[in-house]
Image (cartoon, rainbow, N blue to C red):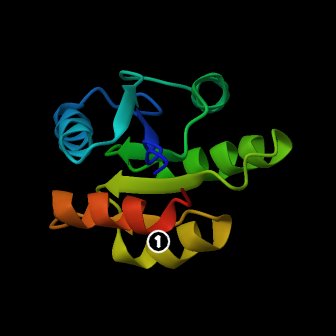
Amino acid sequence: MPEKRVIRVLIAKPGLDGHDKGAKIVAKSLKDAGMEVIYTGIRQTADAIVRTAIQESVDAIGLSILSGTHLSICEELMDKMEKEKLQDTLVLVGGIIPKKDVSRLKKMGIAEVFRPGSTLSEISQFIQGHVSR
């Protein structure tokens, strides 16, 4: 019987926000759920995130954004991903995201937005349910 492929997830902190405790908690939770997690650290650019996603052949990218710059960061990232033909890579955003911005982010191609109150289990289950194996 063939072995199940491990889901590879990139967790990134784009922009100038230096608060990464939540991103680290999510990363550990995804590892505990059996995923391979690459954590980029803080203050990443969209270019660096896309480069790392390509180098690491990830299935999903999780962005942690607390700075209020989620719309511009996500728009830039999604544009760069389209140029690199990474449209099949699942992109998730978590953090302090106003409810009014969720539909705009989804129209950009963000698969899901995890706002305050989302559980670690919801994040893990969403990734497992949406990454083709």
Type of amino acid under label 1? Asp
Foreground pick, 51 / 74:
51
User: Which quadrant holds residue 9?
Assistant: top left
Image vertical order of residue 8 relative to residue 1, above or below: above
Residue 78: x %, y % from top left: 68, 50
Foreground pick, 32 / 116:
32
User: Which quadrant holds residue 16?
Assistant: top left
Q: Residue at x 53, y 54 (%)?
A: 91
Residue 93: x %, y % from top left: 42, 55
Q: Residue at x 56, y 71 (%)?
A: 106
Name the quarter where the C terminus is drawn.
Answer: bottom right
User: Which quadrant holds residue 41?
Assistant: top left
Circle 1 sits on which residue? 101
Residue 129: x %, y % from top left: 42, 68
Q: Residue at x 48, y 44 (%)?
A: 5
Give the side of residue 41 with respect to residue 103, left or right.
left
Residue 80: x %, y % from top left: 75, 40
Foreground pick, 92 / 59:
59
| Disc 1: CA contacts within 10 A as few (<14), some (14-19) or many (>=20) | few
Image vertical order of residue 79 relative to residue 53, above or below: below
Give the side of residue 101 with respect to residue 75, left or right.
left
Residue at the farthest front position? 1
Q: How many marks?
A: 1
**Secondary structure beneath label 1:** helix
